[in-house]
């Protein structure tokens, strides 16, 4: 098989990828905490993970992909103190925590469709794997890695010698309680909660019986339980944003390797932040985040233009967001569509020379910018026939994910279909203001929609 090189955060260097099972990939990606919409910074991470997955598929790997949905246990401040984000969301919207989780999970899946991101092979929800999480904590307790405080069961990081092998942080430089109150009962500053007890003076919406008392799991334990359940021994690659390195992923490694006695994932791959307003990281905690709706759809930007823009920036480099960048990406994507539409549509041969170069780029730590530039070079190559160019670029699009085939088949583009389905739902719910708003968006994107009973018909203008 083709050689693949990836930057491994664990070693801080680019390494040749060697799968546990030949021709197969076990992939785990940290999913969203479903208490609010994902912002486009989050979605940039899911795009890089989609490029990674598609790269392996393009190299003819069989991919088993597991993603978690954090629908309980993630506290404000990303630590072990404060309120649960699902409970806060429930108060904010006057719904139950279960309703909040279900609504924002469905919204997240819709965002993935907008961006042509392939869904995982298996979704796991934290609330659906409580048994596995409790069993993992029991194993750690039996091996003497835990202790109890008045508010929960904690992992004792002093019991392991290499707690910071992923983060490379000097433990003496760490500070406790950076964003929330300190826990004076912790034995070590790096110790973290495995199980939190429910407050004695109030009842949580999400809580479970356990050997230690009624409560809920800590944030990091769910990913260990889900990845071990979903992938078993095929722990090849674990992904996420760079903000997960120092705490979340470091804690995952500590608890998982202590429980199993085996290495927990061979490769750790992290995507950089999305920046906004002069280089400031986009984050919900900073209240400067933009959803896909606000950043793209409301501004008549095709979500695939965001995908195109992400292809132009290496996943380990920060990506900037502003309207000019998105509009430029949309113009470039439109030009690509027009170029593809202008090719003579008849059977052709895939260019082996260009395919080999394309594979070299994407297999070199996902050099998507070079792969995209090569695509443009190939389209300008006068030595290739239109038919061969078309065959080649449609093959490349298996990785790029820009829906280029729809430009040839004259199919209704993905974004139009999604908007039309949303409009149909708004009509069924008698939300006529939203229905009219979505019609205007569809019209601005060059399509007419005609209602037909309980259905609709779309036509290019």
Image (spheres, rainbow, N blue to C red):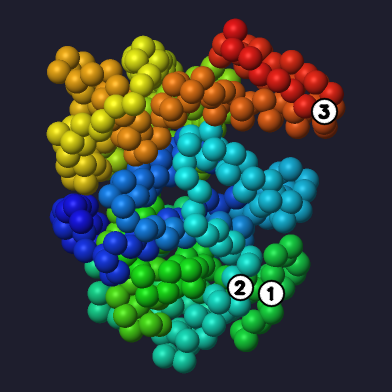
Q: Position of residue 76 (x, y in %)?
A: 55, 54
Q: Secondary structure at mark 3?
A: loop
- Quadrant in the rendering for residue 383: top left
Depth check: give the residue in front, 276 or 235.
235
Q: Which residue carries the number 2 mark?
A: 130
The reply to whether the C-beta atoms of the residues labelled 3 and 2 are less than 8 Å apart is no
- Quadrant in the rendering for residue 22: bottom left
Q: Which residue carries the number 3 mark?
A: 454
Mark toward the viewer: 3 or 2: 3
Mark 3 or 2, nearer chain start: 2
Q: Secondary structure at mark 1?
A: loop
Depth check: give the residue in front, 15 or 324.
15
Q: Which residue carries the number 1 mark?
A: 208
Viewed as shown, does residue 23 lie left or right of 460?
Answer: left
Q: Is residue 238 visible?
A: no
Viewed as shown, does residue 197 lie left or right of 220?
Answer: right
Q: Residue furthest front?
A: 347
The reply to whether the C-beta atoms of the residues labelled 1 and 2 are less than 8 Å apart is yes
- Quadrant in the rendering for residue 178: bottom left
Mark 1 or 3, nearer chain start: 1
Depth check: give the residue in front, 61 or 363.
61
């Amino acid at each position: 098989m083709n050689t693949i090189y990836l930057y491994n955060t664990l070693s801080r260097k680019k390494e040749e990828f060697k799968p546990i099972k030949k021709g197969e990939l076990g992939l785990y990606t940290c999913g969203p905490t479903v208490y609010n919409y994902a912002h486009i910074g989050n979605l940039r991470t899911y795009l890089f993970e989609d490029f990674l997955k598609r790269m392996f598929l393009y190299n003819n790997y069989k991919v088993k992909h597991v993603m978690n949905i954090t629908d309980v246990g993630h506290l404000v401040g990303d630590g072990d103190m404060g309120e649960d984000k699902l409970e806060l969301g429930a108060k904010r919207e006057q719904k139950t925590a279960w309703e909040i989780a279900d609504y924002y999970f469905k919204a997240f899946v819709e965002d993935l469709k907008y961006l042509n991101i392939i869904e995982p092979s298996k979704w796991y929800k934290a609330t659906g794997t409580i048994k596995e999480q409790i069993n993992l904590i029991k194993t750690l307790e039996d091996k003497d890695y835990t202790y109890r405080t008045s508010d929960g069961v904690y992992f004792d990081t002093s019991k392991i010698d290499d707690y910071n092998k992923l983060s490379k942080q000097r433990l003496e430089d760490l500070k406790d309680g950076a964003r929330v109150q300190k826990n004076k009962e912790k034995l070590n500053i790096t110790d973290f909660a495995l199980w939190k007890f429910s407050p004695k003076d109030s009842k949580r919406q999400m809580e479970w019986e356990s050997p230690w008392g009624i409560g809920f799991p800590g944030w990091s334990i769910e990913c260990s339980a889900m990845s071990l359940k979903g992938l078993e021994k095929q722990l090849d690659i674990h992904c996420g944003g760079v903000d997960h390195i120092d705490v979340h992923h470091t804690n995952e490694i500590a608890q998982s390797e202590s429980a199993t006695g085996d290495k927990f994932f061979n490769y750790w791959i992290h995507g950089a932040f999305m920046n906004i307003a002069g280089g400031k990281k986009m984050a919900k905690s900073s209240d400067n985040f933009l959803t896909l709706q606000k950043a793209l759809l409301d501004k008549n930007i095709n979500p695939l233009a965001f995908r195109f823009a992400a292809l132009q920036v290496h996943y380990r480099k920060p990506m900037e967001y502003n309207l000019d960048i998105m509009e430029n990406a949309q113009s470039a994507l439109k030009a690509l569509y027009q170029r593809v539409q202008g090719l003579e549509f008849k059977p052709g041969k895939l260019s082996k020379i260009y395919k080999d170069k394309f594979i070299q780029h994407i297999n070199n730590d996902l050099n998507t910018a070079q792969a995209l530039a090569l695509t443009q070079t190939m389209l300008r190559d006068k030595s290739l026939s239109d038919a061969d160019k078309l065959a080649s670029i449609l093959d490349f699009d298996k990785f790029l994910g820009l829906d280029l085939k729809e430009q040839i088949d004259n199919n209704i583009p993905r974004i139009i279909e999604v908007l039309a389905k949303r409009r149909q739902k708004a009509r069924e719910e008698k939300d006529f203001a939203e229905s009219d708003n979505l019609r205007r968006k569809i019209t601005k994107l060059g399509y007419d929609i005609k209602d037909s009973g309980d259905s609709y018909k779309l036509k290019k203008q």
